[in-house]
Each structure stands twice: as structure tokens, then as C-alpha cells.
Amino acid sequence: MANILIAGCGDIGIRLAGLLHRKNHQVTGIRRHPPENLNETVNFYQADLTETSSFAALPLNFDEVVFMPTPGQRSLASYQAVYDTALENLLKHFEKAERPPHWFFISSTSVYGQSNGEWIDEDSVTEANTPSGQIIRRAELRLLTVLPDTTIVRFSGIYGPGREYLLNSARTAPEIMRDPPYYTNRIHQDDCAGVLDFLIGLRLKGEKLATYYLASDDNPAPQWEVVSWMTEQLGCLPPAVKPPSTPPDLNKRCDNKRLKALGYQLIYPDYRNGYLPMIQKIVTDQISSAAAK
């Protein structure tokens, strides 16, 4: 049984805690506002990682730290608060530990700046061209400088119930550039938790992990294809063709071979597998609502 800390225990953290709990691991989750109905799979520790005084009494005897707080907003200040201030505070806290824990740092594919639809993997150049991506990449390097054994997991676009931006956009008949294609990369939130549970399990068995893992599904697909399929399933107007314009800042295809070579099997390997249950729920709710009128 391992003692595991999830620093920034939001929705995915709670999902991960449930998987770890089933394997009899002890899980502590740091969260500024723990849910009122405390989940028995995780012991919540109320704290703000940007304020060292709020977690001064946090124990030091963790085997693993999963660092995954989420910026409260998309602002530069919010990203700096998480990836500069909070990270530094937690690092300083564990300087007092007799045996420093191993860290899993949850990163993003925004650290890559490729924009021509090329394939990228863990060895591709990381020259982020957005301020948020640059901040995250700086945090990766900072952590590796202090703890070279850190495992960094870079998630692509996370989706699932409650994370329905693209699905909601499809219902508005948006304009989308069809040619040249703009590729979308995604991973279902259940697979986010599954990947982390899988990697933690391998490490606890004594297996040597690589420094970087890219976590995305098997099918980086053009946005036109994805949204067109969504509108067909929803029975709403298809997207309109957007005239070719300046290429987007980020346009790449994520290769997940390193992760899959370890043996991880995706729960939702394709956008169709992941979005179809969400679409079915929308259609069912619409039918129920219409019947109630």
C-alpha cells in the first residue's frame, strides 16, 4: 500500500483517487474547497497551494505526489500562480522530508508549438508559442532540475461530461476551416485518470518510467471531420466552410505510441467512442423535455 498525495484534487483527481483506493492505496487530496459530501476514497486536506501557511502541517511521508492543480482562469496570472508559486511552495515543503517522494507532474501538449499538422511525440521539440504553454514548460524544467526522476504526463485536450466545449460548439453551426485541415487531439477524462493509475502502478511495481509521456487518443482528427460527425449524430445543422486564412498557432497530431507500448489500453480510443454516450444523453434529455411539455 502506497501513501499518495494528489495536489489539486479536482474531478480527474477524484476519479484517480477512486482507482487507487480500489488497490488499497491511501490517498490524500489537496483542494481549496473540498466537496461537502466527502468521498471515502480520498482524505481531503483543505489548503491553497499558493499560500504556504495553509499547508504547513501537511505530512511529509508520501510515496508519490501527483501535481495537477488547475488554473482558476485562462489569465497569465492564474497560470503563474499554479505553475510558479504553487509548485515552488510544494517543492519547498518537501525539502524537509527525509525521503523525498517521487513526483508525477501533469502537463499539457501546449508545450509544443508545432503548427503545420505534423506528428509530434515525447522527443519532439518543445517551443511553446503561447504564454500559458511557455509557463508550463518552464515548470517542467524547474521540477526536473530539482527532482530529475520526475515523470511528466502531457495531456491533450481533455473532454467528457462537464467538459463539452467542442460538443456545444457543434450545435451552433460554426464556421470551420476544412482545407488545410486543423487537427484536434483529445483524451477522455476517464482515460486521464486511467493513464495516471496505470503509470503509478508500474512505478510502484519497480518499473523504470520514462521522463515524458504524451497522453492522447488514437485518432488525431481534423476539426471539420469531428464536428461534422457530431452534427450528424445530433441532427442539427452542419458546420459552414470557413475560407482558408492564417494557419492556427497550434496544429499538430499527437502520437501516443510510448504510452501504449507500456500496455495501456484506452477506454475511449477515438472521439466517436467518447462523445457518443454524451450525445445520446443530450438526445434523450431533449426527448424527455419535449414529452414533458
Image: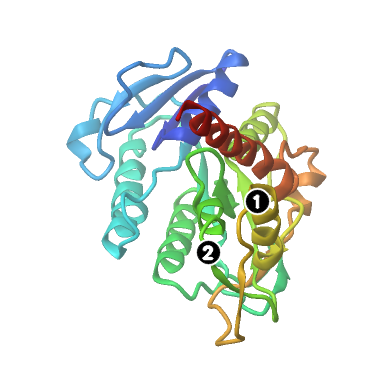
Question: Label 1 sits on what residue type?
Answer: Gly
State whether residue 100 appears in this view.
no
Q: Disc 1 or 2, which lies upstream in sequence?
A: 2
The x, y position of residue 50, in whole percent, is: 25, 45
Q: Is residue 42 above or below residue 291?
A: above
Q: Is residue 240 left or right of residue 100?
A: right
The structure residue drawn at horizontal position 68% and vertical position 59%, both measured from the top left corner, is 226
Question: What separation in Å lies between label 1 and label 2 (alpha carbons)?
Answer: 33 Å
| Residue at which label 2 appears | 110
Q: Quadrant of residue 231?
A: bottom right
Q: Residues within 10 Å of mark 1 (few under 14, many from 20)?
A: few
Which type of secondary structure does the marked residue at label 1 adopt? Answer: loop
The structure residue drawn at horizontal position 79% and vertical position 53%, both measured from the top left corner, is 257
- Residues 248 and 253: in front is 248
- Residues 147 and 4: in front is 4
**In which quadrant will I find the C terminus?**
top left
Q: Quadrant of residue 142?
A: bottom left
Question: Label 2 sits on what residue type?
Answer: Ser
